[in-house]
Image: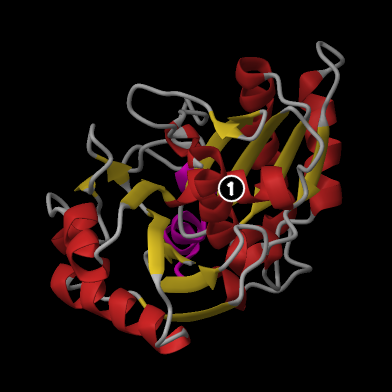
């Protein structure tokens, strides 16, 4: 039997297959479709192309944005607006004739890193993605921590006196360190800013303030970081992040190990495998 894994991001969608929920037998990616109907159809066609003879047992994956209460689709999202309010799990179930499970994409990626990646062997793992936006999740003993409406650490307010972002931009962690926030502030995409520019050092300082809150609220054993602002070139340097986080904690509590995820683009697919392991 074959398991279909998917990861629907704002820019790319990745689809993979697994036969044993331990390894990915094949995967591919394509540009995320803005049309909900086209997106569902493409996921189905891509999965069948990976293995036309596959007998699908279960389908699971993540999607960016805030899920509805039943985790059957998107409640709202600024980028995948046509997907909001649509019955995603129902439509995928119709296409695959198999049960479908859905989670937030960051939660799935964090679960993948906790079980198969940089957080292996740790009981309490926090994952933050620093990319177009900022997301995060807490994983306890290989399971996504329960929450009434999901986790949104990127929306924590940091620049209270608005000295950095001014009066017109909400002073959140996401607007301070995300790729979209940086581009809005400087008028150029992050990948065009040289690594030697001091802004990368400043971003490490801002991110450290957010991680301080993560550490005080969630008390993790390890923090795993992912996303294009961490894995890209240029990027926010991990050594700077560690240094500034230790500084802002000021010995109040011990700083946990902060590291970079190892699964990169396939973290969400590995998370879907870990999720299904818990469902067996």
Near-viewer residue (93 or 144)? 93
Q: Position of residue 55 (x, y in %)?
A: 40, 73
Residue drawn at x 81%, y 10% is 252
The stretch drawn in magenta includes residue 177: yes
Residue drawn at x 52%, y 26% is 145
Residue pointed to by mark 1: 274
**In the visual, does 225 lie left or right of 271?**
right
Residue drawn at x 78%, y 20% is 249
* Residue 92 in view here: yes
Magenta span: 174-187
**In the visual, does 200 lie left or right of 26?**
right
Q: Main secondary structure of the magenta part?
A: helix
Secondary element type, mark 1:
helix
Residue drawn at x 72%, y 37% is 223
Q: Position of residue 161 (x, y in %)?
A: 47, 25
Near-viewer residue (201 or 24)? 24
Quarter residue 192 falls in: bottom right
The stretch drawn in magenta includes residue 53: no
* Residue 130 in view here: no
Q: Position of residue 65 (x, y in %)?
A: 33, 48
Q: Position of residue 70 (x, y in %)?
A: 23, 35
């Amino acid at each position: 039997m074959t398991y279909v894994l998917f990861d629907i991001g704002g820019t790319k969608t990745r689809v993979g297959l697994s036969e044993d929920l331990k390894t990915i037998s094949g995967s591919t990616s394509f540009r995320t479709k803005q049309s909900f109907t086209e997106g569902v159809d493409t996921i189905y066609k891509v999965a069948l192309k990976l293995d036309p003879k596959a007998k699908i047992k279960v389908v699971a994956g993540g999607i960016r944005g805030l899920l509805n209460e039943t985790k059957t689709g998107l409640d709202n999202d600024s980028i995948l607006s046509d997907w909001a309010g649509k019955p995603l799990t129902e439509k995928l179930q119709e296409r695959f004739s198999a049960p479908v499970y859905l989670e937030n994409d960051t939660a799935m990626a964090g679960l993948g890193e906790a079980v198969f990646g940089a957080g292996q062997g740790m009981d309490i793992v926090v994952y933050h993605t620093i990319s177009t936006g900022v997301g995060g999740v807490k994983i306890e003993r290989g399971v996504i921590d329960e929450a009434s409406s999901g986790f949104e650490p990127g929306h924590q307010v940091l620049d209270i006196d608005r000295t950095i972002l001014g009066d017109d931009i909400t002073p959140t962690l996401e607007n301070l360190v995300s790729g979209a926030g940086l581009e809005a502030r400087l008028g150029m995409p992050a990948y065009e800013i040289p690594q030697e520019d001091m802004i990368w050092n400043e971003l490490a300082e801002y991110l450290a303030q957010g991680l301080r809150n993560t550490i005080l609220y969630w008390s993790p054993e390890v923090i795993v970081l992912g996303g294009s602002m961490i894995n890209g070139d240029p990027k926010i340097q991990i050594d700077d992040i560690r240094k500034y986080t230790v500084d802002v904690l000021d010995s109040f509590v011990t700083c946990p190990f902060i590291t970079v995820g190892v699964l990169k683009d396939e973290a969400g697919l590995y998370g879907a495998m870990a999720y299904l392991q818990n469902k067996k």
